Image: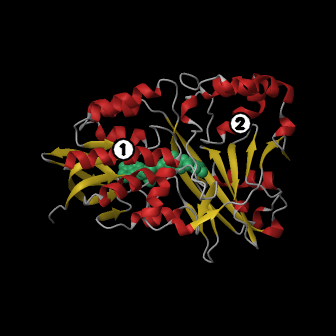
Amino acid sequence: MAESVFDVAILGAGISGLSFAHHAARAGLRCLLLEEAPSPGGCIHTARTGDGFWFELGAHTLYNSYGALLDIMAACGLLDAIQGRSKAPYRLLVDGEVRSVPSQLALGELFASAWRAFTLRKPGRTVGDYYGRLVGRRNWRRVFSALLAAVPSQPADDFPAEMLFKRRPRRKEFPRTFTLDGGLSTLVERLARQERLTLRTSAGAVALERVPPEFRVSCADGSSALARHLALALPPDRGARLLASVLPATAAALQRVRTTNIDSTGVVMARVDLPFPRLAGLVPLDDVFFSAVSRDVVPDARRRALTFHFRSGLGLDDRLARIARVTGARRDRFAETAEHRTCLPSPALGHTDIVRAIDESIAASRVYVTGNFFGGLAIEDCVLRSAAEAQRLVRESG
Ligand SMILES: Cc1cc2nc3c(=O)[nH]c(=O)nc-3n(C[C@H](O)[C@H](O)[C@H](O)COP(=O)(O)OP(=O)(O)OC[C@H]3O[C@@H](n4cnc5c(N)ncnc54)[C@H](O)[C@@H]3O)c2cc1C
């Protein structure tokens, strides 16, 4: 069978690959999007029950400061699907009890430190150093280290401070925090259905080779395709393996980005079966999970759902037992359970040198690299990097 030829083959159908494909397809390029999993989305993964109830196993919140994403949503006619999240508190889990954040803080130390917010700069500092100075060392060690670990579902102390919590202009015509009707996978589904875009799922890339003037991508399902340009939107270690023979310098730089696996487990229960306060999320001070995120922000009359983000290595049975213990719910009252594994980068100081090495090594190579390890881990960071790389593609393919 003759191999299909595309303008660009994009590897990985998370938000980075999907938003890259969006821009490339709109510029008139024929795109092939290859995804290893049975469905696209990567870290965006909404679980849905047969009768329309949904809950998030991965990313859960979009902000009105995500301007690049909002532009894509507008282009896809998705603004009507925006659903504001209702207010609910984030709580701490302390010795098995649910507590408010302020109740665990040394307030004197906090007030004595907070003035540094006016003078302290993030560049060159780790998250632990920067926020430790803002909230005081004791508050950092006891409370804030756990609160910030909840963001990337792993200890964040050594992350570059610049990569968490970016200040961006807000688009006040939209709710400050929101989701979409049917959950965030609604965005994925819409982005996967675009003109000039062919999506193949369960078709992970297993090998790349140069067949000048094209690249050949071979997939796990036995298929292969040719493309004039290649875009990688994969976890960095996966990209490193694939690029080893095609662009060794890029592979070596990608290999330097460490990653962490997260095992997320969600449970759905009838409201009467969950004797647990209404909350947006729960952060334990020290536990086998980093956070639990609740569907309470989009209330349902009959059901509630909670997703716990666990460090990897714990079996499903142990995870469900921990969820039952924390919530006080009986395991035989879990109406639905679902799990999803994701991978996030674990950047450290010096990460900008790695990004520079990646960018220098791909210049004029017809290879484009995007993902959540450039500006930051947030969906908006992925979309911004993809937009910039897609712009380079459009320039170079003209
Ligand atoms: C639990 C959790 C909660 C989060 N919450 C939020 C939030 O509320 N708001 C926010 O802004 N951000 C959030 N984030 C961060 C954000 O969701 C991610 O950083 C972002 O979605 C990553 O997108 P990506 O496309 O770069 O990578 P991924 O989503 O990891 O996508 C990479 C894709 O590549 C595929 N793949 C791997 N190998 C191959 C191969 N060989 N061939 C083809 N495909 C392959 C994978 O299956 C995957 O689909 C959260 C992340 C996690 C894990």
Q: Is residue 342 visible?
A: no
Lateral position of residue 336 relative to residue 369, left or right: right
Q: Give whichever of discs 2 and 1 has the lower sequence position.
A: 2
Residue depicted at 59% across the width and 59% down the height = 173
> Residue 201 in the image: x percent, y percent?
38, 62
* Residue 93 found in image quarter: top right
| Quarter the N terminus occupies | bottom left
Using a 10 Å C-alpha cutoff, classify the residue at mark 1 as few (fewer than 14 neighbours), some (14 to 19) or many (20 or more).
some
Which residue carries the number 1 mark?
A: 388
Residue depicted at 44% across the width and 49% down the height = 383
Q: In the image, which is nearer the foreground, mark 2 or mark 1?
A: 1
Q: Is 148 above or below relative to 82?
A: above
Lateral position of residue 206 relative to residue 58, left or right: left
Q: Is 268 above or below relative to 124?
A: below
Q: CA distance from mark 2 to mark 1?
A: 33 Å
Under mark 1, the amino acid is Ala
Q: Is 181 above or below relative to 324?
A: below
Residue 146 shows which numbered tag? 2
